[in-house]
Amino acid sequence: MRHALIFTLLLLTCAQLSFAQNLVLKGVLKDKGDSTALRNATIRLSSPEDAAFKKQALTDKDGAFEITGLSAKPYIVTISYVGYGELTRAIVLQAETQNLGTVMMPKSSRDLKEVVIKGQVPPSQQKGDTLQYNADAYKVNPDASGEDLIKKMPGITVENGTVKAGGEEVKKVTVDGKDFFGDDAAMALKNLPADAISKIEVFDRQSDQSRFTGFDDGNSVKAINIVTRAEMRNAHFGKVYAGYGTDDRYSAGGSVNFFKDNKRITILGIANNVNQQNFSSQDLLGVQSAASGRGGGGGGGRGGGGRGGGGGNSGGGGGNFLTGGQSGLNTTNSIGINFNDTWGKKVTFSGSYFFNNSNSTNDVITRTQTQFERGIQLENDTALSGSHNYNHRFNVRLEYKIDSSNEIIFEPNISFQKNDRFSNSIGNTFMADTLLSRNLSGSTSENSGYNLNGNLTYRHAFAKRGRTITLGLSARTNDRSGETFTNSDLVYPGSPQDNDSLRQRVRPLSDGVNLGVNVAYTEPIGKSGQLQVNYNPNWSTNNSDRRAYQYDFAGKDYNILDPTQSNMFSNKYNTQSAGLSYRLGNRDRMLMVGVNYQYAEMETKREYPTKNYATQSYQNILPNAMLMYKLGEYSRVRVFYRASTNQPGIDQLQDVYIYSGLTNVSIGNPNLNPQFGHSVMGRYNYTNTQSGQNLFVNMNVQTNSNYIANAIYTPTNGKDSLLTPTDTLKVGGRLSKPINMDGYFSGRTGVTWAMPVKFIKSNLSVNAGVGYSKIPGVTNSLAGFTHNYNYNLGAGLSSNISEYIDFNLSYNAVFNIVNNTIQPENNSNYSTHNASASVNLLSKNGFVLQNEINYTFTKGLGEGFDQRFVLWNASVGKKFLKEKRGELRLSVFDLLKQNRSINRSVNGLDIVDQQNSVLTQYFMLTFTYRLKNFGKLKAPEGGGQQQRRWNRDGGDGPPGGMPGGMRNRDF
């Protein structure tokens, strides 16, 4: 009986394999004009994955054809007939017999692009939890970048260098499943040409442990995987460019890619002074931690010109990468290299190095309205600031597959930052049109820091399917150091005896270490269930040594230690967490519920100026749950719930007075407790591959108890307040202190709907969103809330006509309503509107004409800050040299000289409006040369647009949603 069963299973397996290799492709070919059958037409079939595979057939007297012995995978179909054009299409075989139906062939080659055959790859497909876009369905010009391509795809946007998919920011981009320059999404898209891309896959990338075990730990990020074409995987390609313009503006750079099978090398660099920046959050985080706020003393606040800048406009051309930016005028120099390879059958390596250097200057005009008991105080500040930033960033990922059951992953990364900055400002403070004070302030600072992180993971899969164990170790360390000099003079015209000055040197030093262990064991339960047990201890230590020195006029040096503004402090936070989770179902219908028990101890120790020691312990029950449900062929929903804690930072715990200028004072609170929060996230996706319609709905809700809020205290009755025997809070100034409060809430819902508009060969997208937050706070012992309401509405129309005509139209509006229960006079209602239009025309003989017009207006900011302006950029160029690889282009930025930058922020006490320096009109002449050297994989014979795009059907590369490792298993 046992042998009979084995024999039966073998027969079934062989039958299944035989079926997989015996699919049939058939159809009928007729003339489009008179519907007569086309006899002896040639039907050729090739594979994008295997250059050696070729099959062909001839049509019979009825125009019918049939090709057998095929597999369920992508193919390239080429149909040719004497006297007719040649038709090339990408298809995917899925059924046992794939019938293309009747294909109507036009005699004119110009009408070939209108021919649609059954089985043709749709613009988008939902594959499990991955939304896959097929690049061949979107028309872009021959020189377009990956970013230009994804802008055509419904649901994907690029806003100020930030890539969003379905309304969520994309935090990770991989190329053929391999890391590309760390987590820099925009850099990857800007430095890969569109014609190298076969597919774009959008999915929620889970942690390595989640992908291996099947349990979602809530640490997923929105990700994009770029699947390249098969012929590009053995190729050299890229571009170099250089341009020079009026006002000594310049822009130069390039990117070169060397792809050979699994070995990928990318080298890129830029140098310009036209605000094309290349900073990710990793590049600036360390320096900002050392230089800002309580960490570094800062340089002037109210009246000191030290407020943070709003988002300025970036300009220029050249198609370089932009992953964030600083306001003002910026000069940037950077270089980077990315390397991926597979060594043997067991080792996969990816690594990158990136360096940037930037110099920036900014003229800032700031208006601050503050509501006090005695009326509204108005401050007008004018400041000139500048900075020099240097950054080195290394990222490595090493995967060692010991055997089919064991794997080790090692991910180290390190970054070094150095930042020098200065600020000079003049501020005038008014009350009821009367000048109260004038503040003249200047500061210089030098700061440096590094971050070193490492993760080591070992995973083992037992013989029993679904039984796994994962061991993880993580280590993080950072160090910050710096020095800030501040000179500030506060003048009271009505009472000169109250004049004051500050001459101070601050030296902040800080470091931190974090160690974590993660152990997870999974066990299958029944046919589709799985149980997970996890244990996660974590140890964190942070140290801070801040010394403030006042100026010794006799000794002419900053050597008088100020104990009230100096502090030596350490904080330890250790947690022990254990949990149990249960998962039931598969990718189409899955429910997961779990609970964690967490025990935490927090220890704070102050060594200077006085000694103090305190410990606290906490116990929390942290539930979590997730539901994934496929509603139908085109739609699916996902809901996730998690409870979490968040401990205060060391800068929030230090009870030392820190002055930003003479009027802004802050102090920490060593009695803070960790926040406890609940978050719910929901997502609904609808992707109709037949009609091309897409609908994305996102919802996020967050509540917090013990929320770390801000308490503000201001002098009352027009008199200074005494903080310490030697420190005074001036009239018009404020003291801020973090405190725990309940009642925090935030929620947001966003909807994006996209569909093709066939009669104009374009894609239409409409988006809308509603957000609300309730933020607790205290002003002069009065507790209350700031209610923020924001609404956004937008629409976009992008062409999908041809490579030679490209246009985009869009309109976006954001409405903000801010209501404050403590200071109703600070209620605010303002909006920002932006309308844009761009046209890119390319002639067949190589002439290029581009125009981009952006109209922006703001309403509700008040006199001098409400703006209406048009930013018009244009260019004209000519392609030449072999295969039109060279291009000479004349461009103009801000043709009408109207560029502006306006920003508003509102908190419990202030309404702050800010105007920053922007780049204004310049002309530039740029030469670009494109490198193309493809490998041996050739397209099938044929001409025109279809030959260039013959491999855009996909099918090559990792399955949808699977880059970098295993996705959720089905048990």
Image (cartoon, rainbow, N blue to C red):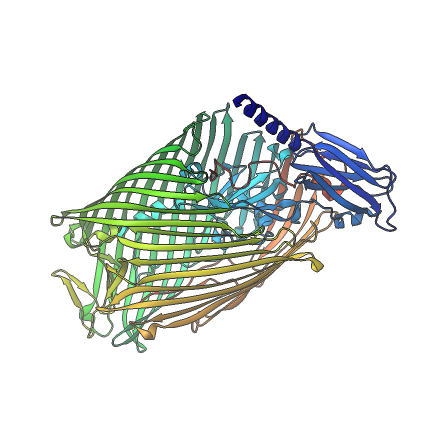
Residue drawn where x is 32% and y is 48% of the image: 289
Residue drawn where x is 53% and y is 35% of the image: 266
Residue 298 visible? The answer is: no
Q: Quadrant of residue 87?
A: top right
In-image side of 555 versus 303 (left or right): left
Q: Residue furthest bottom?
A: 432
User: Disc count in the image?
Assistant: 0
From the viewer's perspective, is residue 423 above or below residue 192? below
Q: Residue furthest top?
A: 3
Rendering coords of residue 160 (x, y %): 49, 54
The residue lying toward the viewer, choosing from 156 and 352, is: 156
In-image side of 67 versus 92 (left or right): right
The residue lying toward the viewer, choosing from 615 and 465, is: 465
Rendering coords of residue 956 (x, y %): 61, 36
Residue drawn where x is 11% and y is 61% of the image: 725
From the viewer's perspective, is residue 697 above or below residue 76? below
The residue lying toward the viewer, choosing from 565 and 136, is: 136
Rendering coords of residue 198 (x, y %): 62, 41
In-image side of 910 versus 161 (left or right): left
Residue 382 visible? The answer is: yes
Q: Quadrant of residue 661?
A: bottom left
Q: Quadrant of residue 238?
A: top right
Rendering coords of residue 641 (x, y %): 38, 52
The residue lying toward the viewer, choosing from 92 and 420, is: 92
